Amino acid sequence: MPHSPEEKKRAITRLRRIKGQAEALERAIEAGTDCAPLLQQIVAMRGATNGLMAEVMEGHLRETFGPANGAHGENGASPFDDDMEGIMRILRTYLK
């Protein structure tokens, strides 16, 4: 769950975008729009939903498995930060 005010704002913004896409899709279906544009809108919604899922998942993983002692290297980043970036890169690939 997003905890900081910035994380909550980003999540709400994404949700509102997804809601707008769903409403547009509903109107398009009611209007009898051809399949190709409908499929394109569905893919866009899936991408937005997967983006939200990745963002929430990253926050959860950082909170759950983050370094307890807050140890950081010379440049301010911890080895955990580097590992987490790699993990999220892989997960985002699979969420596309």
Image (cartoon, rainbow, N blue to C red):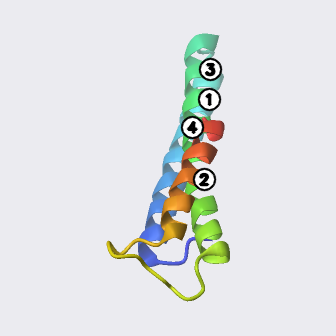
**Pair 3/4: label in front:** 4
Q: Locate residue 63: give its quadrant.
A: bottom right
Q: Marks 3/4: CA distance?
A: 12 Å
The residue beneath circle 2 is 87
The residue beneath circle 1 is 42
Give the total number of marks visible in the rendering: 4
Q: Nearer the viewer, residue 4 or 67?
A: 67
**Residue at 56 percent of width and 27 percent of height:** 41
Q: Marks 4/2: CA distance?
A: 19 Å
Q: Marks 3/2: CA distance?
A: 30 Å
The residue beneath circle 4 is 47
Residue 53 against residue 20 in the figure, above or below: below
Asked if residue 34 shows in the view, the reply is no
Mark with earlier residue (3, 2): 3
- What's the residue type where badge 2 is placed? Ile
The residue beneath circle 3 is 39
Query: Which residue is the extreme one toward the front?
Result: 74
- What's the residue type where badge 1 is placed? Ile
Q: Locate residue 2: give its quadrant.
A: bottom right
- What's the residue type where badge 3 is placed? Leu
Locate the N terminus by quadrant: bottom right
Say what secondary structure mark 3 lies in: helix
Mark 4 Cα shell of 10 Å, populated few (<14), some (14-19), many (≥20): some
Marks 4 and 2 close (CB-CB < 8 Å): no
Q: Marks 3/1: CA distance?
A: 5 Å
**Pair 4/2: label in front:** 2
Say what secondary structure mark 4 lies in: helix
Marks 3 and 2 close (CB-CB < 8 Å): no
**Residue at 50 percent of width and 53 percent of height:** 14
